[in-house]
Amino acid sequence: MENNMISVKRHVKTICVNKSGQTISIDMEDQEFVSGIVGVVRRFEDKQKEYRQKIQELETMPHETEAEQIAQAHAVSAFSAQLCRELKTEVDAAFRDHVCEKVFGNITPSLELFAEFFRQLHPFIKEAAVERNKRIRKYTEKYQKRSGVG
């Protein structure tokens, strides 16, 4: 029997995210991940601006009576929860995994928790991108030499 096989080595970076030993993966060779995570970070930055603007609007709600204060607090909380649910869905979609549950547990994380997650994730993504670029350069240089280009 012939052994016809193609085996492509993937370079997936695995990161431990909790005391239970659960992990998440960064696959810089998956173009959907790369564009997805960049999109999430950009939307996250945009959401912060939107969040601050909406909170300022909500702060102008009437809040003289106890009922008005409760209504205002509920509106702020509902808006924040909606933004964070959307962000949670986007992060999980970018990673193609239940990353938020692994990282944050069974909650809808606050914007502050997402900011901390992205801050801690950034060096891993940067390192994976540098490693990927080195591998790409190695291949492109090899083919440039073969073709006489460069």
Image (spheres, rainbow, N blue to C red):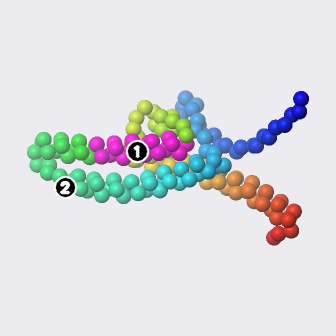
Q: Quadrant of residue 27?
A: top right
Q: How many marks?
A: 2
Q: What is the secondary structure assignment of the residue under circle 1?
A: helix
Residue 80 lies in the magenta stretch = yes
Residue 34 position, x and y percent, is 59, 51
Q: Is residue 146 above or below residue 112?
A: below
Magenta part of the protein: which range? 78-95
Q: Would you say 73 lies left or right of 138 here? A: left
Q: Which residue is mark 2?
A: 60
Residue type, numbered disc 2: Thr
Residue lying at 70% horizontally and 45% vertically, measured from the top left: 11
Residue 72 position, x and y percent, is 20, 46
Residue 62 lies in the magenta stretch = no
Dominant SS of magenta comes to helix
Image disc number at residue 51? none
- Quadrant containing the C terminus in the rendered view: bottom right
Asked whether 50 or 14 is in front, the reply is: 50
Residue lying at 89% horizontally and 33% vertically, measured from the top left: 2
Residue lying at 18% horizontally and 41% vertically, measured from the top left: 70
Residue lying at 89% horizontally and 29% vertically, measured from the top left: 1
Q: Which residue is mark 1?
A: 86
Residue 35 position, x and y percent, is 56, 53
Asked whether 15 or 86 is in front, the reply is: 86
Q: Would you call the spot at circle 1 few (<14 residues within 10 Å), some (14-19), or many (20 or more)?
A: few
Q: What is the secondary structure assignment of the residue under circle 2?
A: loop
Q: Is residue 38 above or below residue 9?
A: below
Q: Would you say 73 lies left or right of 82 here? A: left
Residue type, numbered disc 1: Glu
